[in-house]
Image (cartoon, coloured by chain):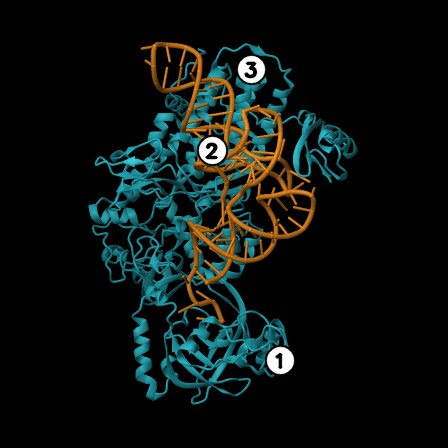
Amino acid sequence: MRTSEIPDFHEVDKKRQRAWYGDNVFKTPAAPGAKKFYCLDMFPYPSGDGLHVGHPLGYIASDILCRYKRMSGFAVLHPMGWDAFGLPAENYAISTGVRPEVTTKKNCDNFKRQMNILGLSYDWDREINTTSPDYYRWTQWIFLQLFNKGLAYEATVPINWCPKCKTGLANEEVYQGRCERCESAIERKKMRQWMLKITAYADHLLEDLEGLDWPASTMHMQKNWIGRSEGAEIKFSLNNSEATFTVFTTRPDTIYGATYMVLSPEHPSALKITAPDRLSAVTDYISASAGKSDLERTELEKDKTGVFTGAYAVNPLTGGKIPVWIADYVLMTYGTGAIMAVPAHDERDWEFAKKYNLPIIQVVAREQGAAPANKVFCEDGVAVNSELINGLRTPEAVKKITAWLENKGLGRAKVNFKLRDWVFSRQRYWGEPIPLVHCEKCGTVPVPESQLPVRLPEVEKFQPTGTGESPLALVEDWVKTECPKCGGPGRRETNTMPQWAGSCWYYLRFIDPKNAKAFIDPAAEKSWMPVDLYIGGSEHAVLHLLYARFWHKVLFDLGLVSTKEPFKKLVHQGMLLSYSYRDLKGVYRGYDELDIRESGMAFTKDGEEIKPVVEKMSKSKKNVINPDEIVTRYGADAFRMYEMFMGPLEDSKPWDMRGIEGIHRFLKRVWVWAASETPEGGDDDKALKLLRNQTIAKLTEDFENLKFNTAVSALMIYLNKLSEKETRAAADLEIFLTLLHPLAPHITDELWEITGHKGSLMTRAWPQADAAVLSARQLEIPVQVNGKVKAKIYSGENTDGKTLEKMALESAAAHLQGKTVVKVIVVPDRLVSIVVK
RNA sequence: GGGCAAGUGGCGGAACUGGUAGACGCGCAGGUCUCAAAAACCUGUGAUCUCACGGUCGUGAGGGUUCGAUUCCCUCCUUGCCCACCA
């Protein structure tokens, strides 16, 4: 049957999807060989709300690229799975009693359905789920590798505690002093925790960023988070006791300007060094700051407080007495928890010194002999008032002082990092159990590999205990076990792993998802790694992307993976925004409660007029667009293409219903053009032949660079030209449908069949542009006179400059009358610029 | 406060390495078809002056380099994101 009558595109979708998924045409080739392409989407947490139109943006982009790569002869690995441990399912269980695995299953099925109606070409044979015991068995196994290497340790330290989620959090999960998830103010709580020694990899994590094809901003964020800084540790003694303490500074050259010292309130020596008559003041200050949350401490940022201890340190260079203070602007978690304060050359110290009337001594000048500064000067300069280093530029001064201190045994060069060890345990139910047993005799003993996985027990109560213990602690018959070492009584570790654990290595499991003997087969790992392209949101810039790199490097050092880095190229898709409406009372109104006009203005039932605001899509703003409805109405291809046509993949941009209408119109025109009975045309139209080859070249380039918006527009230009003609060349039909296929796979496959072809276009080779046709084109070269285009000349490619100049002068002759040509600039193949007087 | 990114028609956006600014789409206007409407198709569409030919202005603002600047440099403004006492 051949008809140009336009079908219901959603019905076409269903028909093509039955064929694809039925035959599993997306199955990953067994042995990838040299031309492999591992394209990974960040796997989602399957929430109960399902996908909104913003989620698939990255999935569509990667899908287009995978289809294009398959057509270009690559073996493609394009998998999908579920990062399904986490709080929402557990909180849902607390309020309803429905077990998390039940909700998780339901949500995964819904996500998968929503992905499949878009025609995403995942190899579902490789689907994984982090909550499946077959999967988390190996998450636990990798944890044990870290444990055995000494990279996992127990510590009782003050951690970030979220009072609402009732669990400890990693530093990376705290956003501006608040819980990243629920926005509660974070409290400090001293608890026994499992920690991972990510700091042991600080250097590698920093250095290896260099070789990656990642967005610069993401690399910056990781660099800042790791926060390497070079300086020195300097030991100070006190004038009234034997005690000493050490400070860290990046500017040892300013030591002559150190007019006071500060210890953090948590510093272990704080009370020890305090003079008896200052004890009560100091004690009060310490307990006051202990009661403050981090949020309170930072909110009072500008107003620094502190208390004098009555003790004096000795400046090792001058022998001078320096008062020692306690102040909470010095953090115990960085450096040594103590500083030498140099108010003349540090803004914070300057502020503090002004407030407490402490002396300010300038020891660095911008230039030799510059007038004394009356404000803080933090840049490099020349040392002054500093006997040993006077006249030296800052870098030399730093070196000399450090060497002098080292010589005397009073200090050493030191590199410090902002990165802290990873608080890895959570006091919650729905996570991987940490596979360890506590035994009175043997201490902490790893669960033997043969006994993995340590399964999550079924419980009645999911409610966090709030005591700092996980709900698992209440499951006495699960907790009670045998010590794997001595056989005596043991108790299981009841903390669980954080949400990030499963995603630290999932990209490896996709390569060998069903392996029951190992987390991955080494040969398979070698053949697919690294991930060639990783697409996902930028919100993971310092969470998942740092944690996964850390685990990967540990596995690399253990000889278990072959690459230093897991993700070669990284791209962040932008956020989809949409129009939201808020009435005079500030209440968000949904689209169904409003009368929305063409202009975008809306009216409530009471006649109140509301202007739209472009905002992030969210349920609370009632501006969520559901992809299911769009797909039912316009078909998956229009949806896919519109999302790509909206703008650059990385940009945030607003969803506009009128935009998708335009794409729908385009696809209908494609249908009419391809499906109509049109006389077969010859292939002698030179202009068309050129355009055809230009389009091939453009699409190839754009796909390689993930510039899908301009790829779509190139196809529109091609179709506009094709539609003008009374005839249709076979070459155009085939090439147009082939080029369009990655973007609109359903309609193109259907048209392929209707026009008498067999099989899916996906199995067809990607076309090659004919270089001879491209270079044989006539160029239109503008001729400028004093910067304005006055004429055009036409020539073939690579015409020599002299000829072009001559042609240009002739063509612009009318504009040169009575003037003197001062200069002629010829840019071959581009333009000729004539300067006249 | 610091760092990064970005500001182009009524709107989303395009523009190679400094070389015809506004591709493509939306919207809008006019037209064809229709009893009418929708759909579809055709034409036009940065501002401004001009009957017209054509000219002038124009990529957040102001300067600079250049034959030529959305693109490079300086100053400033605005927006977004990230970090936020890291010594």
* Residue where numbered disc 3 is placed: A725
Q: Are marks 3 and 1 on the same chain?
A: yes
Position of the N terminus of chain A, as image quadrant, is: top left
The answer to which of A506 and A747 lies nearer the viewer is A747
Is residue A637 visible in the rendered image? The answer is no
Q: Quick one: label 1, few (<14), some, or many (20+) residues within 10 Å?
A: some
Per the image, label 2 sits on a secondary structure element best described as helix
Q: In front here: A560 or A452?
A: A560
Disc 2/disc 1 C-alpha distance (Å): 63 Å
Q: Chain of mark 2?
A: A
Identify the residue at image location x=37%, y=48%.
Answer: A136
Which residue lies under the disc numbered 1? A390
Name the spot of residue A732 as percent of width and height, x first: 57, 19
Q: Amino acid at mark 1?
A: Asn
Q: Where is residue A433, by image quadrant?
A: bottom left
Q: Residue furthest bottom?
A: A240
B80 horizontally vs A441: left or right? right
Chain B shade in the render? orange
Tell me what hue chain A is rendered in. cyan
Which residue in the structure is indicated by mark 2?
Answer: A645
User: Are marks 2 and 1 in one subunit?
Assistant: yes
